[in-house]
Image (cartoon, coloured by chain):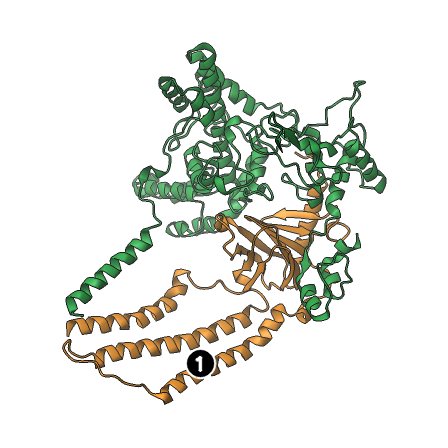
Chain colours: A green, B orange
Amino acid sequence: MDLTTCRRSSAALLAGAALLLTSGCDFEPHAADREYALSENNLGELADAPDVQATILGALEMLYGTPQEPKFMVTSDWRSDGYNPNWPTYPKGEDGGGDFTDEQLDALYADNTARHAEALALVEAGDYDAVADTYLPQALVQNWKRLMEDKAAGQFDTDGKFDEAAFKDEARRTLVEFYPTLRQSADFYRRECLHCHGNSGGGDGPTARFLSPLPRDYRKGVFKFTALADKATPRREDLFRIVAEGVYTTAMPSFRRFGDAELNGVTDYVRLLAMRGEVETRLTYAFLDAESITPDDVSESYLDVWAKWTDPNKEVITFDGEIPAPTPELIARGRELFMDPAKGNCFSCHGEQGLGNGASAWETDSDGVKHRIKDDWGHDIIPRNLVRGVFRFGRKPIDIYRRIYAGINGTPMPGLGKSTDANGDPLLPGDDMWALVHYVRSLGEKEDGFGLDAFSVVEAMDGGVDPLQHGAPHEGANDEHHGGAQAH
Amino acid sequence: MLTRLFTALLLLAVPVLGVYTFVTAADHGWWMQPEVSTFGQDVDFLFYLILGMVTFFFVLTEMLLFWFVWRYSKKDSSKAVYTHGSHKLEMLWTAVPAGLLVLIAFFQMSTWAEMRFKGSFPEGEPFAHVWASQFDWRFQYPGADGEFGTMDDLESPYEFVVPVNQPVKFVLHSRDVIHSFSVPAFRLKQDAMPGLAIPVWFQAEEIGEYDLVCMELCGWGHYKMAGKVRVVSEEDYRAYMAGLQSEFMNTGMEG
């Protein structure tokens, strides 16, 4: 091989390697949606009316902005009231929403103070340039950069001299009172949420197709898990809890690694997407009803949906008193209610053993084919297997209480808390609610969910004990690790 | 001549840049976190021992490569000569690494035994059962009755709170696929296997918050699967458990 060939082949090799390394990259800038889209259903309804599609998208852009610049439109009434939904942490009347109570704001700022302690210490020490090197939320880094630019531009100079005290105050405020703007929260959403929940919140992001259950489609305004009675639209706190704690055993993880400010911010953006989706559907059906969309339709749906989401009078399910102890009698009573078609009727879907295999979870279609019943989003419903002892909304007694009280939104799981029997009396009076709660919780207790003990497997191999044999005599480490699980 | 020089220098750049990267890594924050667990030092000792051996042979072989290219490269027209090699040399470079491997095997035995052997596990009930699932961590503590698997078990996502200077035993589970419970600051890593309950222990020596990461590619959300191990004083640990307990009995009246 002469030198030229050698050079040529190495060049080819290099090029090949470069190609291999970048083959996974997507160079198409339009791969990520840059605009909100109409939902599939609405698009189908308006298939023959492209001009109406454009009208609706235009109206929605006026009301909610774009993915790059999301914002709630401020109505003239709001403006004269000094109310601006885009600034929830500002007190009402100071061009803010005043959405947070004083206690909530204090907690928010305390969380910021703790999380940005290192940066705050640097501010106190006067080492402003080092602040950007500490670990700060991406949105706060932007804010800090802007502050430093202002400093460099001489905004904190009085009579040509740098006013350090004024700057320190502003720097402290930036760090402690950090709350992302909707635009910054939309960035956060694109980084952390979009790949499942989609650009318009339709639960149709690129990774959604790998998931079971599927991610929530916000645009119906229906969210399964809240602490509210009457299937009300969730409060900020309800969505925050889902973001912070995740929905266990689904692909929705806990996002606690982010601070309260960022999580509340992304909750604002999720609310915006949900409201946008609802208004979109309302406008679509307004057109289908009347063959036209009037400005009144637009403002009416905007205000209606806003009022529905921000209604301050939603009933939070609470229990005034102490939770009764889960005595065997109460649990037995719970079992009765579970099996009573006139009372709990739980077995019909959750099965007599609570395995989630009840007959009512299936239906037979006109062709005689049996299939699972569907929820509001058109997905199969698999009733909870209560024996696993894993609950999506949490396993605390009050969590289960709220599920039985209010049901699960968007599914046939009914709320029994306000139900009455044929005589108009409460269906589950007195301790009956708790009897059911404790019975459901006791089902999980029997589960030998702790699996095989790694040591006992080794011992089994040594001593010929079959660890797969349920109830086989385990000795030594096994009892130690299984602890109470085996006592039952 | 120029090509020869260039090739030789390229080969020289490998050990030089390689060593330089390692030496300056700490300045860029790319080195290991400070260790804060009882067996952290032993693990680090083994790490540095192996790193030292590897560095020696890496630099040696790379320098030889550089030297051979520089010293023995011939003009383009010259013909290659066949050589059978040296038996003595081959035996040497087989026997020395083999001996070193045996040495490492002996060195690591006590550390491995301390971390993983049943006899070295702390006595008594585990502090928690840790559940890995796509894509988060859940920590299950015994409730008021001190027993696991009962109705009053407490559960918390994301954050594992443990007392400082106490051997902490927990049992690791997976709900779906293989995950790995890894706390780099503790030099601790254990795979979570579906269907297996794996006992793990550590003893943290400093109060603080430490990253908990999943170290086994467990699906597309693997990078999201983060947690925290918060090491607190005994007092704070009790306070935290009491807080979990009162949260458990919360009836929503406090909002």
User: Residue A396, image x and y in percent?
Assistant: 69, 41
User: Residue A304, image x and y in percent?
Assistant: 52, 18
Task: Classify mark 1: helix, strand or loop.
Answer: helix
Q: Nearer the viewer, residue A462 or B154?
A: A462
User: Residue A139, image x and y in percent?
Assistant: 42, 41
Q: Is residue A78 above or below residue B203?
A: above
Q: Residue A206, located in which quarter of the rendered image?
A: top left
In this rendering, the count of numbered labels is 1
Residue A94 visible at all? no
Q: Nearer the viewer, residue A240 or B78?
A: B78
For the point 60% across and 43% down, which residue is it? A248
Residue B186 visible at all? yes
Disc 1: which chain? B
Q: Nearer the viewer, residue A244 or A22?
A: A22
User: Residue A457, image x and y in percent?
Assistant: 68, 64
Q: Is residue A328 left or right of residue B71?
A: right
Please identify the residue farthest to the front as the structure is shown.
A367
Q: Is residue B169 above or below residue A200?
A: below
Q: Residue A359, located in which quarter of the rendered image?
A: top right
Residue denoted by label 1? B97
> Looking at the figure, which quarter contains the N terminus of chain A?
bottom left
